[in-house]
Image (cartoon, rainbow, N blue to C red):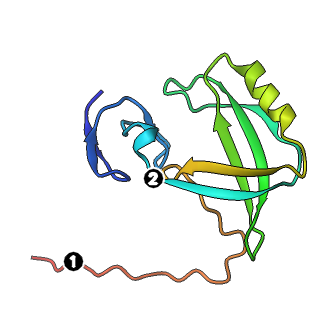
């Protein structure tokens, strides 16, 4: 795989991983090097064991999914997905079984690959791009 500069980390890297910011196959540094965010809240329903496609080859992997109401003034909801290694479906199901509605949790996740959704935008303003002069 060809090495390139990964925009989120601005480093030349060739670790052979999927860069979640583009959801495309190219290289990015190992997850241990990514900046992390931490969120605390309460599960609004029991966690679920699902199947996702985060494997570099597009193969299905077990995915622990949960929705939490954050401990913040606005009580935002956060959907969380934790991938498990391929073949660890039983471990994923066991983790989901332990996480019941009302359970308080703290989630740590890399900022790279995080997706934000503004479900109630009040305005979208178009920014005019400057035109290049014709030489």
Residue placed farthest to the top in the image? Answer: 87
Q: Residue at x 38, y 36 (%)?
A: 26
Q: Callout 1 environment at 10 Å: few (<14), some (14 to 19), or many (20+)?
A: few
Q: In this rendering, would 24 be left or right of 76?
A: left
Q: In this view, does 57 lie to the left or right of 4?
A: right
Picture quadrant of residue 81 = top right
Q: Mark 2 points at which residue?
A: 35
Which part of the image, by quadrant, shows the N terminus?
top left
Q: Is residue 81 above or below residue 8?
A: above
Residue at screen point 64% across, 28% down? 84
Q: Which of 53 and 11 is in front in this view?
A: 11
In the structure shown, which secondary structural element does the residue marked by tag 1 occupy?
loop
Residue 102 x %, y %: 89, 52
Q: Which residue lies furthest to the left in this view?
A: 135
Residue plotted at (87% across, 54% down): 44
Name the one closer to the observer, 135 or 44: 44
Q: Could you say which is closer to the camera, residue 37 or residue 82?
A: 37
Label 1 to label 2, Cα distance in Å? 36 Å
x, y (%) of residue 25?
A: 43, 35
Viewer-nearest of labels 1 and 2? 2
Tag 1 residue:
132
Determine the secondary structure under disc 2.
loop
Q: Is residue 86 above or below residue 113?
A: above
Left or right side of 123 for 110: left
Quarter of the figure that contains the C terminus? bottom left
Residue 133: image location, x then y, percent: 17, 80
Q: Earlier in the sequence, mark 1 or mark 2?
A: 2
Question: Measuring 66% from the left and 38% from the top, which residue is drawn there?
Answer: 82
The residue carrying pointer 2 sits among few (fewer than 14), some (14 to 19) or many (20 or more) residues within 10 Å by Cα, namely few
Residue 53: percent from left, percent from top: 61, 31
Report which quarter residue 73 is drawn in.
bottom right
């Amino acid at each position: 795989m060809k090495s390139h500069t990964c925009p989120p980390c601005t480093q030349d890297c060739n670790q052979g991983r999927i860069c979640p910011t583009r959801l495309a196959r190219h290289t990015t540094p190992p997850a241990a090097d990514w900046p992390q965010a931490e969120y605390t809240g309460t599960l609004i329903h029991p966690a679920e064991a699902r199947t996702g496609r985060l494997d570099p080859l597009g193969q299905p992997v077990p995915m622990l999914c949960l929705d939490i109401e954050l401990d913040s003034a606005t009580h935002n909801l956060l959907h969380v997905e934790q991938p498990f290694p391929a073949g660890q479906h039983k471990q994923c199901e066991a983790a989901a079984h332990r996480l019941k509605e009302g359970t308080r949790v703290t989630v740590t996740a890399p900022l790279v690959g995080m997706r934000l959704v503004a479900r109630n935008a009040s305005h979208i303003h178009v920014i005019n791009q400057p035109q290049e002069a014709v030489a």
